[in-house]
Amino acid sequence: MYAKIPVLKFTSLVQAIKEVKVSPAKGSKDGVYNLTFKKSRKTLLGVAKKDWGSNYNLVEIGRAIEKYPISQKKGSIYFNGVTLPLKYLCLIHYYSKFFNYGGNIDGKIATIDNLRFGVLDAINGVRQIVAVFVRKDYDQFNFKGKVVMDIGGYIGETALFFLDRGASKVISYEPHPELFKLLKKNVALNGYKAITHNKAVSAKAGTLDLFVTEELHSSTTCPNRGNNLGSFEVETISIISEIEKHEPDIIKMDCEGEEYAILEELVRRPQTAGKIKEGIILEVHPYDKAHNMARIRVLLRELGFKNIKRSPIAPSGIITSLVTAKRTA
């Protein structure tokens, strides 16, 4: 077990960056860092699992501060024209990547790759745009002329990614009503068309509880994941009926824990599962011993996918992993 890093308290953000040097620990696993405090010359090794984010992001934050104007006042950070709550300091490295790539923000409109996106606020939107267009998480298939089911549509960033790369049809599912409105608006804003459903995809049609978090992309069907602010009931649509209806080439899933129920239902219905022509891209959200990466691998193999690749989104895949499963080797 790695040593736990104590909470770092500084009088200002700039002081924190100046006082601490963060570097990967030599010969260590991903996610283990040396933190050197310059004044005391004291070095601490390691990052406890729940602490990786603040220390990992400190590297990116330091680089961002060197390039872009930044200031701190009370509970807010002002970074290159963006105002963030201090507790979302980690988002600076996403904004830095966004600006470095050529992205622009004007009010609540973010522009990247000649596409425009309405975002909810400073903490909801840019992180996902960076994952899709800068990090290119979903650039795992040739989408030209393909039918894509987009499960977990958020604000339309993945739907637009697929459409912009030539997908012939995108069917996008987003259960959160605020996000769904933005999804529809953003697709239309860019002159594209998509089939959209204000519903969650699950094993069966019906309802389920959606547990909401402050960062809406993390809203989940799992009550024991994260700091939930409350929940509300959403309508579900059957994965089987949707595959039978659309016969997709590719399915993308980012459904915050519901991926297990979906894949398990597909295993029970192999004839329908066989209508997925090329493959699946999904985020894996582990939340207990029965719901983890190992379980996802078993399910994908049972579905006949031969080429399964995992890319950790966080160091060591602590939070989520992105998995690509293809029919062919």
Image: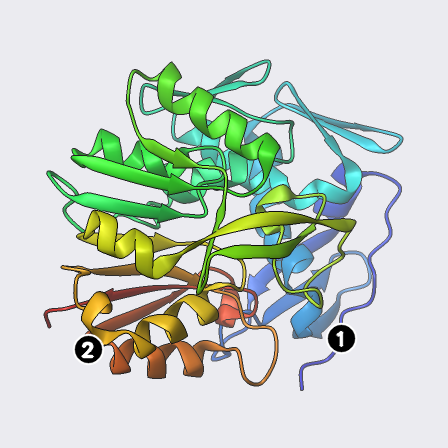
Q: Residue at x 77, y 44 (%)?
A: 87
Mark toward the viewer: 1 or 2: 2
Viewer-proximal residue among 19 and 112: 112
Q: Residue at x 16, y 33 (%)?
A: 166
**Secondary element at image label 1:** loop
Which kind of residue does numbered mark 2 sit on? Gly
**Secondary element at image label 2:** loop
Which kind of residue does numbered mark 1 sit on? Lys
**Going by the image, does 18 lie left or right of 109?**
right
Q: Measured along the vertical axis of the image, is residue 75 above or below residue 324?
A: above
Q: Earlier in the sequence, mark 1 or mark 2?
A: 1
The residue most toward the top is 106
**Residue occupied by mark 2:** 304
**Residue occupied by mark 1:** 4
Q: Measured along the vertical axis of the image, is residue 29 above or below residue 36?
A: below
**Going by the image, does 327 lie left or right of 1?**
left
To which quarter of the image does residue 148 belong? top left
Q: Do labels 1 and 2 touch, CB within 8 Å?
A: no
Quarter of the image that includes the N terminus: bottom right
Expressed as whole percent of the image width and height from the top left, the position of residue 132 reads: 38, 42
Q: Residue at x 24, y 32 (%)?
A: 163
**Going by the image, does 278 lie left or right of 84?**
left
Expressed as whole percent of the image width and height from the top left, the position of residue 45 reads: 67, 75
